[in-house]
Amino acid sequence: MDIQANIIEFKKRLEGTSCKLVAVSKTKPAAYIREAYAANQLDFGENKVQELREKPAQLPDDIRWHMIGHLQSNKVKYIAPFIHLIHAVDSLKLLEEINKQAKKNERVIECLLQVHIAREEHKFGFDETELMQLPGSEHFSALQHIKIVGLMGMATFTDDRAQIRSEFRHLKDIFESIKKSVELPNLEMRELSMGMSDDYDIAIEEGSTMIRVGSKLFGPRLYIN
């Protein structure tokens, strides 16, 4: 597996688009990440807080770490000092904890709101009604140490590419609706994180600004305890 060549190839595919590559490095050793970094890849996604706590000390300081997995409120404190972007914010409670920990670290943490667009019930995220009500709430406007910079969504795991396209298109419509209708100091809709290894091409066509790709860059997942 030539990681540097894979990174370069993917970045060529993104030329002429507004889409960025987040290399999903979960379960991968620091050596793999260094190879990707050598190809000028700076954005890396992790889905476990434990890995996210351990890896930065082994790697260059200018890497931008993305939390892409489900985040429990009691673990926010471990990543608050350094995290670049939290993708999967799925509740006001979590936002409030991120705000609390960001304040302790004297910084503003950028976040994406996760929207439940898939047909699988087990996936996390706001439903559309909850999402549209959130920015107008008093609790949201009081959060001065977070900034919502966009939305994130995961399509249904299916071979039906028309369904995947429909779900991504629906998320883009929601994104544009909020962008046009909501003006708040702690909200700036500029990122739409959708698309992974098996559906990134559809996501790019439907307006993604950030794809999360792992296996096509690093090979099959390495399972660790």
Image: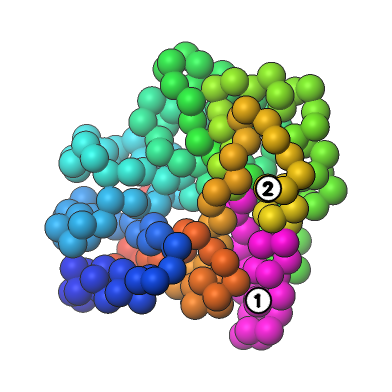
23 horizontally vs 108: left or right: left
Q: Which mark is residue 126?
A: none
Say which quarter of the image contains residue 34. Answer: bottom left
Residue 206 percent across, percent down from the top left: 60, 71
Point 70% across, 35% down: residue? 183
The front one of 175 and 41 is 175
Q: Secondary structure at mark 1?
A: helix
Label 2 element class: helix
Left or right position of 121 against 19: right
The structure's colour scheme is rainbow
Say which amino acid is labelled 1. Ile
Q: Is residue 160 magenta?
A: yes
Residue under pointer 2: 179
Q: Picture quarter containing residue 148?
A: top right
Magenta segment boundaries in residue numbering: 151-173
* Location of residue 218 in the rendering, given as x and y in whole percent from the top left corner: 29, 68
> Relative to residue 38, is residue 120 drawn left or right?
right
- From the image, state whether disc 2 or disc 1 is nearer to you: 2
Res 91 → quadrant:
top right
Q: Residue at x 65, y 77 (%)?
A: 165
